[in-house]
Amino acid sequence: MSDAPTTQPVLQVEGLVKHFPIHGGLLQRRTGEVRAVDGVSFWIRRGETLGLVGESGCGKSTIGKVVLKLIEPTAGRIVLAGEDVTQLKPGAMWTHRRRIQTIFQDPYSSMNPRLPSGTIVGEPLENFGIARGAARDERIAQLFQRVGLRPEAMRKYAHEFSGGQRQRLGIAKALSVNPDVIVADEPVSALDVSVQAQVLNLLIDLQEEFQLAYLFISHDLAVMRHISHRIAVMYLGRIVELTAKRTLFTQPLHPYTEALLSAATAPDPKRRRQRKRIVQGDVPSPAKPPPGCHFHTRCPYAMPECKITAPPLVEVAEGHHVACLRRPVGGDPRPLSVP
Amino acid sequence: MSAILEVRDLHTQFDTLDGVVRAVDGVSFDVARGETLGIVGESGCGKSVTAMSILRLIPPETGRIASGSIRFEGEELTSLSEEAMKRLRGHRISMIFQEPMTSLNPVLTVGTQIAENVVRHLGVPWSAARERAFEMLDLVRIADARRRLDEYPHQLSGGMRQRVMIAMALSCDPQVLIADEPTTALDVTIQAQILDLMLELKEKTGTAIVLITHDLGVVAETTERVVVMYAGRKVEEAPVEALFAEPLHPYTRGLMRAIPRLDVEADAAGTRPRLQEIPGLVPRLTQPIPGCAFAPRCSFATDRCRGEAPPLVDAGGGHTVACWEVGRVRAST
């Protein structure tokens, strides 16, 4: 990658592939595979948010799980704070888990209902041998305060908190081990708008305070634009466009990005009649992705060549990567016309 | 325009272990023939319970319409017999839900399910009902509709299932279609297609739509008039342009400032403006709320707000708001 990061990235992913086998028939033989992630590369600097956006089935959550090494990649390399962790077995991965933590969409499902919230948040402190006893309790109280919960709430159980408060608990738990990277998979999707704002503001404050790197996974373009510095747009297992946030929204180059932006609703009734929708139809199954460019079946600008050749992700302008045959290096950045 | 549906002072309550929950607490609104009315609010505000009340789908074991009136084409629904309600549902008033898979029968083909509804309500022969099912699938732009008639719900994608639900809901030409978060479970590119389809069909058939959603973007792009609910009460109602041009209730204002915007070009590279938070939490609905339900979270609140519930007042141009301090809210930026 020619626009290599100026400082050492805290997380680097190269050529990541994850295929899930499909078993079928009487003998449950392997009959195919879902190419959930099909050759994905990116990096994240300290203090930076990389947004992964795409629709269901595009592989964004699988990337999160592979990067966390909750599932093993089929191919590719994951470098965490300068160390290649791709081949590490669970035991060896253990020490690296401190560096990379996660926040889930529904924190409730990851919390033991029979433990007080303080114990849940403090578990990583014990597991990693960071603090015990009074020191641990003090650290938990600090964490509670930092995420906007009263330290007395340590004695309450998960079900006694609201959705937004539970997400704060999840954030406190992730923060407890001072990670470098946090993978946040749809962390505000289940929250009401007014609470969503509280959690997004908290995540941004924490990032600035602790120089956290976020891999922020979401389907919501408005949330993405708010929190990300750079954004990667995914379609059926591949990154189709990766660039600085501002460029993505002012000068989208990939037809799928354009389609996503045109489909997003805006809270402004005056815009309703102006919009043109540019795609129809459904996303094809990731078990049977179309040949060539995965998007050609829905792309209004597709050429015959697009059905055959899978376009590589190339840097067409500084820091702006696009995988589209109609967007060559040094090409005209103006909107495409239908051939 | 005459109202086809009139809801007056609706109170719907549920019995829980914590006491009686006042899920809908005195809500009134009209739906005019052929219009699209949005009901917007956050979880627990009573928007879905309002819809369920209109269709009399509140489970009698735990809940009830405690008082109020719901008139459809002049006929009172709250006292209608269950038999008469059954003839109404899916025929003159129909409904689509967020998750089509939970309302479709997994062991019947979609053609059979649509045709069943047509036979039940219109009394036509099965062959004519099948033909109607085909027409409806074609109308909601399901490609190869003839073949899809014989497919089961699991063979369809999420977007197509929602199209089937719309086809079924419109199969008997209802006067009112209630859509409860119809696109929330769908991807953005599919959501756009479904919303466009609903509006297009509304133009064709003249069916009034009550669109229930938490998404202000969906409201802005699809509705003509909007009711904003908070804690079981209507706090504001306005034509959609007026609501977004000048929201008058502090809660509506708070909601609009809390959402990240895609359409605002202000931020330079790297700077992330803070979202405005609405402090605090939604009140518990098991206790009677004497004053304005939003007062504990409102920066304009006075002692009167906490002690006495504000009535809905006319703010001009079809805009009504329930706020004692609307003058101060208006004067602030």
Image (spheres, coloured by chain):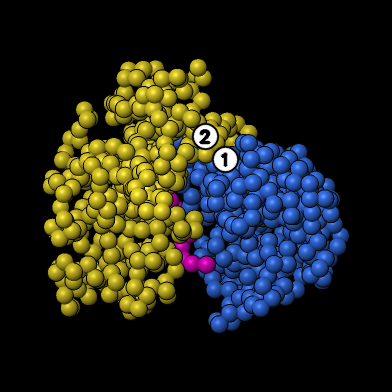
Chain colours: A yellow, B blue
The correct choice, above or below, for B295 with respect to A297 in the image is: below
Q: Position of residue B201 (x, y in %)?
A: 71, 41
2 and 1 marks in contact (CB < 8 Å): yes
Query: What range is drawn magenta here?
Result: B275-282
Q: Position of residue B215 (x, y in %)?
A: 56, 51
- The 10 Å Cα crowd at callout 2, few under 14, some 14 to 19, many 20 or more, is some
Q: Residue at x 83, y 66 (%)?
A: B84
The mark closer to the camera, 2 or 1, is 1
Residue A203, quarter of picture: bottom left
Q: Is residue B181 left or right of residue A38?
A: right
Q: Residue at x 79, y 65 (%)?
A: B85
- The 10 Å Cα crowd at callout 1, few under 14, some 14 to 19, many 20 or more, is many
Label disc, if present, on residue B192 of the rendered structure: 1
| Amino acid type, residue under disc 2 in the picture | Ser
Residue on which disc 2 sits: A262
Q: Chain of mark 1?
A: B
Q: Secondary structure at mark 1?
A: helix
